């Protein structure tokens, strides 16, 4: 039987997979830090793709590190085509002193691998390559499906140049399904199939009212205060009931459908609520949300979060200074079908209308939200194959709170998105001691391979 | 003629005065910094008072550094009594690299002395002692008036313990007039006679909503955001037209009288406006204030200044964090007859009434405003003797924007307050390269001596 042999070949691919993962994590490809070896990271990934039988090369972006593009289309025009979206950039490793071992050296202990990027996202690249090796091994050295890889170098810095790159290269990116860069299991080992990501629009607001800070005894009633200007402006953005006050901000919002609600209802709400309350020392959530409404509110509501505030004197004691400058960082999470560029324009128009022409807006980046219908046959197939591999009922998650470059794939290229992967709640992506359980690596690769095998057999069609 | 000889004796006192000033500034008596040699500073001052013929000793405060109390009451019960209020503490010298020479070593170049405290306030102590020496020299070794010194060690940290100390020692502090710790000339060399100080109430507002910072993608619509709570709370304190919204905040305000307005009208408004506009790069002042209204608004309006804001992420780029903590520093300047303790209580009641029970208020200190009637005979005498010394019409200033412990003297001890001193607009008190022009030191000492001499002749009575 194909599936059993496939599983065995995945397991056989582990040793080489770990050796390659060690080479990948040894390159500190931190997109956020200017001197990082991004090109070396890209070249290593391209070389690995070639090692695994693909054509691969670097394609420049308009201002960022290159995208690694790889493909093996030898299965022919009648076979389905799968596009893998991944990234070779990683989060910074700082603070180093909180790591138990060097973040740029793969360490494997008690069945767990540690290093920066071991899960997010280099471990997922390894997972895909192990799955492809297993498929080749069970198909006489050939892949039974066509595959394409888009492995970018800016996912951790909001994929600034990727949407434009995808638009420009849409002609080579056609595929029947896109396998997203992440996935994995929940606390109970149930596989999670994630069907959407929120968008984001991130701004800095700046106020400057004076050439330099003044003495509050002199300027208090004569000089405009940058901190006051900023506070008054911010207070017009959202009311104490969490309603965002930008005109028309909710116009494009597509509410959760009845089917979405039924999916949220099936999630392990009580456990998640209890965990968050204990972790953050909360007695209740905003709006007293609980149960399905807790899940709905977490992801289907647009948000406006102040991420940072800075002005004047922050040290100990009473310094009587009147600040010349003030700054706020503000993050809007967007739900389908909100658009970060419209939020940018509407924020400017709103501040102007409220008399805050003096508040400067710096747009630090945006991503559009994107979803795939959880009833899409590809999602159903991903769930079915997950159940076979994990032997547990998968969780279908209609939307998650975070953001990523899903829109250019899901909407721009009209590709259904599915997730399968190697993550788990303790993976510590973005944090010190990022880790990967080898059992998750094997299960993720098996799931990937099984999904591709099922596609090769004509499953997953509408 | 007494006055001419007095002037000569003041000039004769300069060399010893500078030598003593050098000893004073060599002690870094920075009240704000915990390891400062405050006791050594107090003892040095007491020793100097003894050198100049006074009895002097340190009197403890209830928790702060001691007050240096000195007196020479040998003029007898029929002679008037003058109380000098000064302070031996100084501002921190930081940042050291902006000083042209060591801040704790007196340097005299081109007729200007440089060091921390050379003006604020050790130079004023020297000024008083030079004046007393000159009076003794012209009166057979005796003072023609009784003098008392109250030299505290916490003026730069809001004189926290002085009001209580004055209340406890009121029995020894009786005097006909109090000579304040500062004074001097404006840009044009005109002597300024200052007749009042605003009060202050300084607070930190704290919000904490979570055990630690959360990810904005998860918590954005479920977790209370400390920065938002603080912003909403602050926005209830003052509106965009600068009206303070605490209930009853203006009830105790005594408006500027017609006479006050006439004094403000006589000040060099145009020059001051032009200077501030250029210095701070302003095209207009709040409320378009100009002329007499500019002066009135500067000092006769209560203020509410945000001095500092801090929350969440302040570094470069887009960090999607939901802050668990936020802090604001807020300074209310008070005009007669507002009371900082009432502001403290009203701020708590207001935040509670607006639903912000969760905002913690830390009261960092307060001082009550205080004034003397600019037509008081003592003020008139200070102005008359100033005109004789400076040979320019003095400026009578009914109130200044800054704060100090004037209330316990002016109201608690019912003493008229007058100013005479050694300051000028370039003195850089509180800043690097604090300096004292020796001509100002001599003029300030002459003014002090002439004022005391006039008192000894029976002038200044109602």
Image (cartoon, coloured by chain):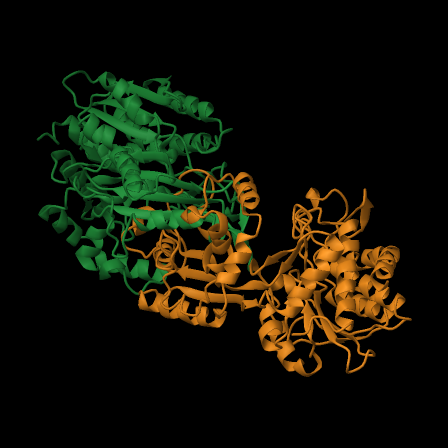
Chain colours: A green, B orange
Which residue is at a point 74% across and 60% down the rendered structure image? B124
Q: Is residue B35 visible?
A: no
Which residue is at a point 54% across and 41% down the rendered structure image? B274
> In front: B357, or A398?
B357
Figure check: B184 above or below A91: below
Figure check: B268 above or below B409: above
User: Is B186 positioned to the left or the right of B46 in the image?
Assistant: left
> In front: A52, or A316?
A316
Q: Is residue B445 visible?
A: yes
Residue B74 falls in image quadrant:
bottom right
Which residue is at a point 74% across and 42% down the rendered structure image? B100
Residue farthest front in this picture? B1
**Where does residue B214 sit, x and y in percent of width and height?**
37, 52
Which residue is at a point 81% across and 43% down the rendered structure image? B109
**Where does residue B226 sit, x and y in percent of width and height?**
38, 56
User: Is A10 positioned to the left or the right of B74 in the image?
Assistant: left
Residue B196 falls in image quadrant:
bottom right
Q: Quadrant of the C terminus of chain B?
A: bottom right
> In front: A56, or B201?
B201
**Where does residue A303 sit, x and y in percent of width and height?**
27, 47
Q: Quadrant of the N terminus of chain B?
A: bottom right
Figure check: A206 above or below B165: above
> In front: A29, or B156?
B156
Question: How many numbered dots are placed on residues in this image?
Answer: 0
**Where does residue A393 sit, x and y in percent of width and height?**
18, 48
User: Is A111 positioned to the left or the right of B415 in the image?
Assistant: left
């Amino acid at each position: 039987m194909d599936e059993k042999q496939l599983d065995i070949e995945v397991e056989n691919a582990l040793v080489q997979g770990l050796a390659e993962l060690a080479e990948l994590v040894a390159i500190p490809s931190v997109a956020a830090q200017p001197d990082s070896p991004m090109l070396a990271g890209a070249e290593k990934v391209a070389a690995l793709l070639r090692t695994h039988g693909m054509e691969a090369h670097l394609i420049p972006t308009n201002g960022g590190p290159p995208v690694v593009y790889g493909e093996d289309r030898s299965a022919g025009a009648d076979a389905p085509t799968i596009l893998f979206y991944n990234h070779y950039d990683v989060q910074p490793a700082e603070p180093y002193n909180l790591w138990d071992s060097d973040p740029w050296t793969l360490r494997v202990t008690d069945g767990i691998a540690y290093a920066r990027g071991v899960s997010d996202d280099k471990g997922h690249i390894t997972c895909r390559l192990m799955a492809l090796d297993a498929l080749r091994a069970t198909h006489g050295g050939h892949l039974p499906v066509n595959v394409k890889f888009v492995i970018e170098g800016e996912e951790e810095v909001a994929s600034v140049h990727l949407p434009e790159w995808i638009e420009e290269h849409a002609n080579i990116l056609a595929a029947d399904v896109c396998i997203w860069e992440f996935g994995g299991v929940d606390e109970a080992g149930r596989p999670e199939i994630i069907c959407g990501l929120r968008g984001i629009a991130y701004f800095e607001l700046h106020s400057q009212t004076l050439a330099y800070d003044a003495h509050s005894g002199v300027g208090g009633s004569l000089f405009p205060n940058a901190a006051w200007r900023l506070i008054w402006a911010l207070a017009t953005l959202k009311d104490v009931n969490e309603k965002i006050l930008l005109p028309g901000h909710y116009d494009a919002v597509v509410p959760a459908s009845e089917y979405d609600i039924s999916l949220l209802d099936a999630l392990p709400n009580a456990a998640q609520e209890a965990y968050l309350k204990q972790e953050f020392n909360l007695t209740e959530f905003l709006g007293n949300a609980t149960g399905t409404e807790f899940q709905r509110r977490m992801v289907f509501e647009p948000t406006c979060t102040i991420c940072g505030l800075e002005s004047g004197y922050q040290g100990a004691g009473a310094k009587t200074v009147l600040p010349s400058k003030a700054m706020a960082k503000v993050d809007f999470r967007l739900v389908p079908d909100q658009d970060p560029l419209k939020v940018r324009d509407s924020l400017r128009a709103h501040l102007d209308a409220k008399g805050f022409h003096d508040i400067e807006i710096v747009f630090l980046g945006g991503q559009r939200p994107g979803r795939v219908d959880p009833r899409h046959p590809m999602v159903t197939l991903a769930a079915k194959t997950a159940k076979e591999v994990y032997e547990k009922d998968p969780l279908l998650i209609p939307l998650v709170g975070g953001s990523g470059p899903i829109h250019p794939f899901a909407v721009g290229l009209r590709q259904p998105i599915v997730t399968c992967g190697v993550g788990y709640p303790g993976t510590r992506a973005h944090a010190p001691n990022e880790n990967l359980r080898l059992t998750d690596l094997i299960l993720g690769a098996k799931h990937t391979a099984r999904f591709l095998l099922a596609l090769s057999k004509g499953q997953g069609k509408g």
